[in-house]
Every structure is written in structure tokens, then in C-alpha cells.
Image (cartoon, rainbow, N blue to C red):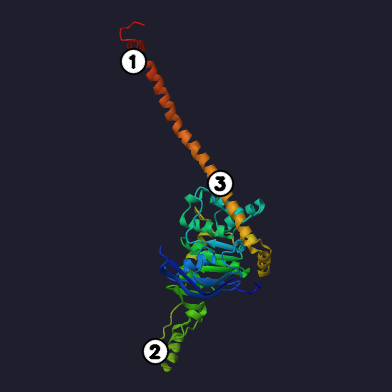
Amino acid sequence: MTATAPIVEASGLTKVFRDFWRRPRVRAVDNLAFEIRRGEIFGLLGPNGSGKSTTIKMILGLLHKTSGRLSVFGRAPDDVAVKKHIGFLPEESYLYRFLDARETLDYYGKLFGLEASVRKRRADELLQMVGLERVAHRPIGEYSKGMMRRIGIAQALVNDPEFLILDEPTSGLDPLGTRQVKDLLLDLKSRGKTILLSSHLLADVEDVCDRMVILYGGKVRAEGTSEELLRDSGRSVIETDRLDPSAVAAVQSVLAERGIGDATVAAPRQSLEHFFLDIVARAQSEAAATDGARTGSGTAAFLREETSGDDVVRSLLESAPASEAADVILAEASAEESVAASTDQKVIGDLVEEDLAPDRADRTDRATDDSESGPDRGMIDDLLDGGDGSK
């Protein structure tokens, strides 16, 4: 694959889910054809059930296509060698609730084989970037949904991916966090990253995406740039400095002479997002106190280091065969699970021992008391010896 080749190419891509008897049940994706070009933000839109998540899972190699052609970095989606160049944020972040933010990033850094010093530096930079450095010590299970999305975004970037897949990245975020994510995406794009964005918030897609496809029923219903898809060819807009009443009357008179009588002149209206951000900026300038996540510090330093397509191609060519890489990753994952399981068992065992210790001590004390204050041992001995009291 050359540096200018598309990151993702799909042609005739189809996915059919079947029932137990192998009978076709749902055609989730139907003959899709699209490409995601290097260095662009590509939007994947559609209502629930339109095939977005199924398409993303096939790109990630989590689902196998039924028919058609699909390649990622010029290789099959299930080729393990491409995984280290991909960052993924699912619609729901399934993270370990007992780990804190720093431990979470360190864990995922280990899965990508990063050295300890690199993991620490990237964790610090990412936590500052998403505004969680002040709450990095808190377990993930205590985070709000918005904070979970922030740490999820940081997790998706820990390996400095060439291709970033984001499924509803701004879900649960406040307007400040939403604006920050959009600025981050634009910054990553300027540094050569390729991004696939799936979102129900159409304003987010409109603000950042270069091109998009709109799916319905598993098929592409529209494709193009925001300008191509959203241009209203039936109306015209004239922008100028504020006009005084006489100028407005003159403009309306000229339009009326040309047979345009429904023209309106009004002051422009700013968006609610810009108004909200202006209020927050003024509050921050006054050093107003707030808890929880803060405004991030901008794109992490390691993400600002540009990587070229040639670097990715060279890495893929030098990578081990997919079967060997898969064996290594599976072995590392198995070892991680074994260590986590043994640690969990030890912690649970210690807690159980602590909880049972008072009960055991209590039972021992009661047994001792019963032996000392129970029926007369001499009477029992007499009965056992014949009941006549003789020895």
C-alpha cells in the first residue's frame, strides 16, 4: 500500500446475520461502497439500525463480511499487524471500574507494548489533554458519563494511532467538552491522522467532517462533502455590516423591483454553543471554582509529532506474520488475565477471612462456655457407667 492509498476501501460490502439454521435473518449491511482517504475526517451517519456499528466492527475485524471486498491499510481487517495503528472508542466505554485513570492508561499502554517511561509520559499528557489530571486517582467506577467519555478518548489515543475510529465521542459531554473534542479532531487531522467519526449529533459531524456517507437500511443513501450535501440552491444570503433603516428600505425596494417581495432583513444570530462557551470563558477568567473535569490543555505533545504514511507502510512490511503476532498478543492477554484473576482471588480471600474471623471467634467462645457451664459431667459419666452412680 502506498502512502497516498486510502486507509479503508470497501466495495460491495455485505453482512447478513443468520439464525441457528443458517437462514438469512437480517441484512445489516447491503452492498456498501466507500473509501476513507488518508488525512481526512470521514463521517458515518444514519439512524439506529442503519448498519453503522456493523460496518465499524467489520473494519476492526470483529465481524467477518458475508461478501464483497474490505481492506484496512491495504490488508484484511483481521490482520493483527494493522491493529497497533488503530485507536478505537466504542459507543460505550467498557473499562475496569476498580482501576483509576492513570492505571487504566498504563494498562492499555502495556497491551501495545509501550515501555514504562513512555506509558507514564503519555498518561500524564493525555490526562491533562482531557482535563482529568485532578481526578486521576479516583476509580473509573466513580466517574460520571462525561468523564468516562474523556478517559475513553484518552485510552483510544494512548498508542498514537494513525487511524482513529470514534463511535459517538461526544455522547455525555458538556458543551465545553464537546467543543474540545471537535478542536482535538481538527488538530489531529492537521497532523496527518485519519479519523472515522460516527455520531447522532449531526452538528458535530457538520463542523469537523470533510466527507460523509448517510446510511439507511444498510445502504448508502447519500455521499459527499458537507458543502455538496447541504447547499441550498434555492435561496441566497447576503452578509454585510449592520444597515440603518433607510438602507434596509433601499435594499427591499431594489429587490421588489426585481419581483422578490418576501426578502427579510434581520440581525444575525450566534449559535447557542458560541454563547455558552463565551459565558464559561468569562467565568474562568474570574477564577470561578468548579469540581470535576476541567478544560483540557490542548493536544498531547506526543500526538503533535507528525507521522507519515510511509512510516505505517514500513511498519506493516516489517511486522511479523499475522499468526505469530496473534499468538504473542493472545499469550500476553492470557498472562494479564491470569495475574488479574489470581490478584482478585487473593483480595477476595483476604476480605472473606476478615469477615469470618469474628464469627469463628464467637463460635469458639460459645463452645468453650458450653463445655464449662453445661450439664454436670459427673452425672453424665454415671449414666454412661450404668446409671447407678458406681464407677
**Spatial separation of the CA atoms under disc 3 and disc 1:** 54 Å
Could you say where residue 289 lies in the image, as x and y percent from the top left?
A: 50, 53
Q: Is residue 184 left or right of residue 262?
A: right
Read off the residue under disc 2.
Answer: 261
Could you say where residue 183 lies in the image, as x and y percent from the top left?
A: 56, 66
Read off the residue under disc 3.
Answer: 338
**Spatial separation of the CA atoms under disc 2 and disc 1:** 112 Å
Rendered view: 174 above or below 71: above
Q: Which of marks 3 and 2 precedes in the sequence?
A: 2
Q: Which of marks 1 and 2 precedes in the sequence?
A: 2
Rendered view: 70 above or below 93: below
| Quadrant of image for the C terminus | top left
Is disc 3 in contact with disc 1, using a CB cutoff of under 8 Å? no
Q: Quadrant of residue 379?
A: top left
Label 1 neighbourhood size at 10 Å, few (<14), some (14-19), many (20+)?
Answer: few
For numbered disc 2, what is the local secondary structure?
loop
Q: Which of marks 1 and 3 precedes in the sequence?
A: 3
Kindly identify the amino acid type of the residue bearing the numbered disc 1.
Pro
**Residue 241 visible in the snapshot:** no
Kindly identify the amino acid type of the residue bearing the numbered disc 3.
Ser
Mark 2 against mark 3, which lies toward the viewer?
3
Read off the residue under disc 1.
Answer: 375
Kindly identify the amino acid type of the residue bearing the numbered disc 2.
Gly
For numbered disc 1, what is the local secondary structure?
loop
Rendered residue at 46%/36% (across/down): 352
Could you say where residue 154 lies in the image, as x and y percent from the top left?
A: 56, 58
